[in-house]
């Protein structure tokens, strides 16, 4: 699965965005180690705090179906009615990625409507992170 194809799936997932409050529409496509793909969009709520980002929708869909190993996520976000612009994952989503993904391997692909693309490793977007290993007394990524 190429980064370009994964980004196409993120763009398609963005069509499902429910974002009547921010009018900011986001789609994500998560590539699992077994080659399967889970997509998600942001889903907002009148009470605001129950809203969820596209990235976590995709990750939680995958985890709820037994997937635990992930290689990459493509993200396409931007204002309603406009082209997607490079959109980085929020801090909460980065921490959720940290729960399941190797910071040194997991790739985060940001895409814009112009075709511009930026790729980061999770460790670059979440340095000196706290993760499952810390609770086991290991400080693998210190
Ligand atoms: O990477 C991001 C950034 C924002 N959002 C959502 C949350 C909210 O619904 C809207 C505005 O922040 O965009 C995402 O889904 N992913
Ligand atoms: Zn988020």
Image (cartoon, grey):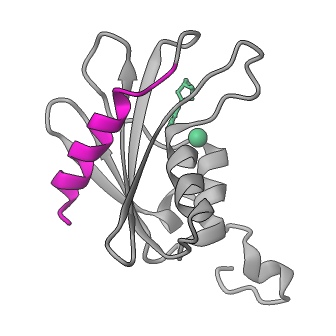
Which residue occupies 59% across, 10% down? 21
Is residue 133 in view?
yes
Q: Main secondary structure of the magenta part?
A: helix
Quarter of the figure with the C terminus:
bottom right
Residue 121 location, x and y as percent? Answer: 42, 65
Which residue occupies 51% across, 21% down? 18
48 lies left or right of 122: right
> Which of the two residues, 87 or 6, is positioned nearer the viewer here?
6
Looking at this view, name the residue that lies furthest to the front.
65
Residue 106 location, x and y as percent? Answer: 44, 70
Whether the magenta-drawn stretch holds residue 3 is answered as: yes
> Which of the two residues, 140 or 25, is positioned nearer the viewer here?
25
In which quadrant of this rendering is ligand 2 seen?
top right
Is residue 127 in view?
no
Quarter of the figure with the N terminus:
bottom left
When the figure is inspected, residue 139 is found, relative to residue 23, above or below; the finding is below
Quadrant housing residue 46: top right
Whether the magenta-drawn stretch holds residue 13 is answered as: yes
User: In the image, which residues are magenta?
Assistant: 1-18
Residue 23 location, x and y as percent? Answer: 48, 12
When the figure is inspected, residue 4 is found, relative to residue 132, above or below; the finding is above
Which residue occupies 59% across, 64% down? 63
When the figure is inspected, residue 67 is found, relative to residue 117, above or below; the finding is below
Q: How many marks?
A: 0
Quadrant housing residue 12: top left
Residue 136 location, x and y as percent? Answer: 83, 87
């Amino acid at each position: 699965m190429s980064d370009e194809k994964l980004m196409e799936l993120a763009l398609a997932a963005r069509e499902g965005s429910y974002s009547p409050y921010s009018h900011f529409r986001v789609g994500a496509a998560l590539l699992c180690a077994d080659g399967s793909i889970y997509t998600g969009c942001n889903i907002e709520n009148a009470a605001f705090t129950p809203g969820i980002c596209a990235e976590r929708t995709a990750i939680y869909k995958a985890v709820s179906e037994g997937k635990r190993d992930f290689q990459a996520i493509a993200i396409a976000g931007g204002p309603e009615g406009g082209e997607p612009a490079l959109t980085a994952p929020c801090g909460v989503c980065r921490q959720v990625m940290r729960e399941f993904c190797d910071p040194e391997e997991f790739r985060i692909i940001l895409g814009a409507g112009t075709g511009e693309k930026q790729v980061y490793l999770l460790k670059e977007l979440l340095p000196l992170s706290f993760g499952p290993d810390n609770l086991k007394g290991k400080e693998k990524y210190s």
